[in-house]
Amino acid sequence: MGTPDPHEALRALLDHEHAVLLSARLSDIAAITDQKEQLLAQLAAAPKPAGHSAVAQLRGQAKRNAELLSAVRRGLTAARTRIGHIRAGGAGLKTYDRQGQSSPLNASSGAVIRRA
């Protein structure tokens, strides 16, 4: 039995990466990245596949996973921003005037307004 085909190994790894991203097991991404780098080095030295369909399939899988990674990054950035706002006491309250312009309601002034 010979060594496994690096094209097939990369295809399987990209499928695994897809499953990891969908299940949000982000701690597994670093190991997958290392494996992808090793497989890409093997691909550079391997004979080219007979048809372009194998390369096109790998390209499609890689693009699909890149889009998922981008979505994960945007989600993590949004979560980090939201947590920062919560820790800072929220974004504060805004009021709107008759023209629809917003302005922050400064509740931290400590002044109490009393009306009769």
Image (cartoon, helix red, strand yellow):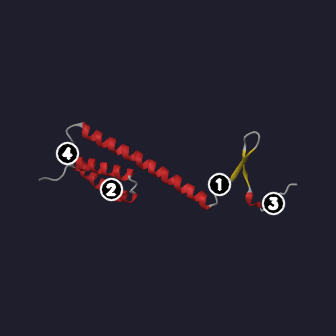
Mark 1 or mark 4, earlier in chain: 4
Residue in the picture at 38% in, 57% down: 25
Three-letter amino acid code at the position of disc 1:
Ala
User: Where residue 78 sits in the image (x, y, percent)?
Assistant: 53, 52
Q: Quadrant of residue 106?
A: bottom right
Residue in the picture at 33% in, 59% down: 31
For mark 4, what is the residue? 47
Look at the numbered disc 1 and give the secondary structure of its residue.
loop
User: Where residue 73 sits in the image (x, y, percent)?
Assistant: 46, 52
Mark 4 or mark 3, earlier in chain: 4
Mark 1 or mark 2, earlier in chain: 2
Q: Quadrant of residue 59?
A: top left
For mark 1, what is the residue? 91
Three-letter amino acid code at the position of disc 4:
Pro
Badge 1 local density, few (<14 within 10 Å), some, or many (20+)?
A: few
Look at the numbered disc 4 and give the secondary structure of its residue.
loop
Mark 2 or mark 4, earlier in chain: 2
Count of all numbered marks drawn on residues in the image: 4
Mark 3 or mark 1, earlier in chain: 1
Three-letter amino acid code at the position of disc 2:
Ile
Three-letter amino acid code at the position of disc 3:
Val
For mark 2, what is the residue? 32
Tell me how far mark 4 sits from mark 3, CA to CA. Answer: 79 Å
Tell me how far mark 3 sits from mark 1, CA to CA. Answer: 21 Å
Q: Nearer the viewer, mark 2 or mark 4?
A: 2
Tell me how far mark 1 sits from mark 4, CA to CA. Answer: 57 Å
Mark 3 or mark 2, earlier in chain: 2
